[in-house]
Amino acid sequence: MPVFLLPPSRLLSISDGDTPEVKMGLRMLGIDAPELHFPLGSDPVSQDPVLEALPKTAAWAKLPKDLQHYLLPRLEKAGTRQKAWGMKAKAAFEAMVAEGLAVKGTTRRRNLFLACGPEVFDRYGRILAYVGPCVPKAERGDAPPPDTFNLNMLQGGWAAPCIHKENVPKPKDMALAIAAVQNARKKKLGFWAEAGLVLHGYEFRSLCRLAAGEAGFTYSITDARTLKAAKPTVLSPVEYIQVPEEYRVFG
């Protein structure tokens, strides 16, 4: 009896009697890019009128006043902005993958480096992983491994940090992610150029669900700066803006 049912996967090949190779979805750990196919695979632009009408609903009235004030300017054409930045994030990711996997002077492409955390699958059955170019030590010598694409996306301002308590990075990796977000925000890179107007992916999804009569913000927030304290700072889901983006730990 399976303990976790994965979504249907396409069979690619069979290498021997107990090793099928399948195509599976993968979600990059620790980051959240703007949405291109939400809700339920639809066009985010369709949510423009829905989210612009949200402040007139009872669900909105239940949100804390400071959260309402923070979200209000981000509701105008929220889906349009989400899609526009989602397309830019996808293009940036495609470019960095093409460059990162290229082998100089050849037409060969590198394999991907994949590393999972303690929680290997998300609730949709996708593998959760850090992803980057696989450069053997014999090739790179004393140089460190290349940065992951996860970190690259944060550095370029193409994704917001989205760390869940089940997969908190090691201190060194956490420090790199924090520095990447702080620098991208300071220099207004990527979507940070519209920081006061664009919703993070998780905000967009939460508000779409809230507008549909479902639970909106559902993850409690722990301040990463207090994770090792005797009593970490844990806030309710609707208090998340009290913690800067780079220090939010969800769940």
Image (cartoon, rainbow, N blue to C red):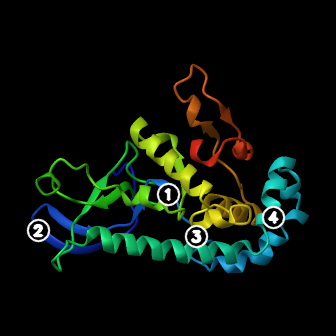
Camera-nearest label, 3 or 1: 1
Farthest residue, direction front = 187
Q: Circle 4 sits on which residue?
A: 73
Which tag, 2 or 4, sits closer to the chain's start?
A: 2
Which tag, 1 or 4, sits closer to the chain's start?
A: 4
**Residue 244 at x, y percent in the picture:** 65, 44
Q: Circle 2 sits on which residue?
A: 15
Question: Which structural element holds mark 1?
Answer: helix
**Residue 178 at x, y percent in the picture:** 52, 45
Camera-nearest label, 2 or 1: 1
Q: Circle 1 sits on which residue?
A: 154
Which tag, 2 or 3, sits closer to the chain's start?
A: 2
Residue shown at the point (63%, 62%) measured from the top left: 192
Type of residue at label 1?
Answer: Leu
Residue shown at the point (20%, 71%) measured from the top left: 103
What whole-number distance in Å separates the C-alpha atoms at marks 1 and 4?
24 Å
* Mark 2 touches mark 3? (CB < 8 Å): no
**Residue 195 at x, y percent in the picture:** 68, 61
**Residue 104 visible (yes or no):** yes
What whole-number distance in Å separates the C-alpha atoms at marks 2 and 1?
37 Å
Type of residue at label 2?
Answer: Ser
* Mark 4 touches mark 3? (CB < 8 Å): no
The mark found on residue 92 in the picture is: none
What whole-number distance in Å separates the C-alpha atoms at marks 4 and 3?
19 Å
Camera-nearest label, 4 or 3: 4
Question: Which structural element holds mark 3?
Answer: loop
* Mark 3 touches mark 1? (CB < 8 Å): no
Q: Circle 3 sits on which residue?
A: 35
* Mark 1 touches mark 4? (CB < 8 Å): no
What whole-number distance in Å separates the C-alpha atoms at marks 3 and 1?
15 Å
What whole-number distance in Å separates the C-alpha atoms at marks 2 and 4?
54 Å
